Amino acid sequence: MALDGAVTRAAFSEAEIAERVRGLGDEIARDYVGLEPVLVGILKGTFVFMADLVRAITMPLLVDFMAISRYGPTAQTKGVVRILKDLDVSITGRHVLFVEDIIDTGMTLHYILRTLSARRPASLKVCTLLDVPRRRLVELPIAYRGFTMENGFLVGYGLDFRERYRNLPYLGLLDERLLRPPSASEQVPPSGGA
Ligand code: IMP
Ligand code: MG
């Protein structure tokens, strides 16, 4: 796929991702036999992973999505999220598998898991495509993990940098030079789009 040079290389290829997602699907199907789990994803980052994952889980399940907005990019406000679109289905008494694209500081997930567990699901587990344990600020239990990463900012396969690159079929490393804080004249207001 032609790029503008901002993606330096593929960290995980299409084939590697497909194989790993199949593996996760098998594991999940084995663990949830007869339980009809609800898979919950956050828009928009999880939409590609979710689409592949649910097709790799060959058993009855439900799929639902939430949309959230972060209040701001600073360290103090990073874990503060607002629910823009809540779940359509009730998760009370149901087995919930929360699906994430990437767990970085873990602040977003920490907040959402608290909100979801207050609804008294029968169980609540986490499946993430990518785990960056080095950047974690809060401890989180992760039941299913696609890949572990040391550092770098990934785009593609649903993950964005300022809303771009979600459609890359692989996970690419973004050029580090783009990650420097924007100068005052380029500053964008806080927005959603996890
Ligand atoms: P956390 O609250 O720091 O764990 O942030 C998690 C969210 O930040 C993810 O769901 C992504 O939306 C975004 N994010 C964190 N790291 C990356 C990355 O390397 N590439 C793209 N998005 C990322
Ligand atoms: Mg996300």
Image (cartoon, rainbow, N blue to C red):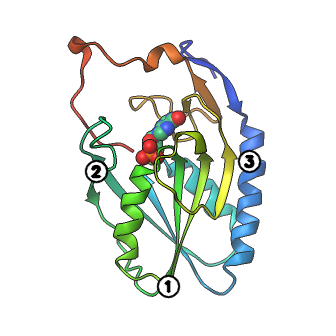
Q: Which residue is mark 1?
A: 122
Q: Position of residue 140 (x, y in %)?
A: 52, 59
Callout 1 amino acid? Ala
Q: Which residue is mark 3?
A: 18
Residue 32 is drawn in which quadrant? bottom right
Q: Is residue 65 left or right of residue 129?
A: left
Q: Position of residue 44 (x, y in %)?
A: 42, 47
Q: Which residue is mark 2?
A: 80
Q: Is residue 166 visible?
A: no
Q: Which residue is at a point 40% across and 83% down the rendered structure image? A: 120
> Residue 176: which numbered mark, if any?
none
Q: Could you tell me which secondary element the residue under label 2 belongs to? A: loop
Q: Position of residue 84 (x, y in %)?
A: 26, 56
Q: Could you tell me which secondary element the residue under label 3 belongs to? A: helix
Callout 3 amino acid? Ala
Q: Is residue 52 left or right of residue 43?
A: right
Q: Which residue is at a point 72% across and 38% down the rendered structure image? A: 14
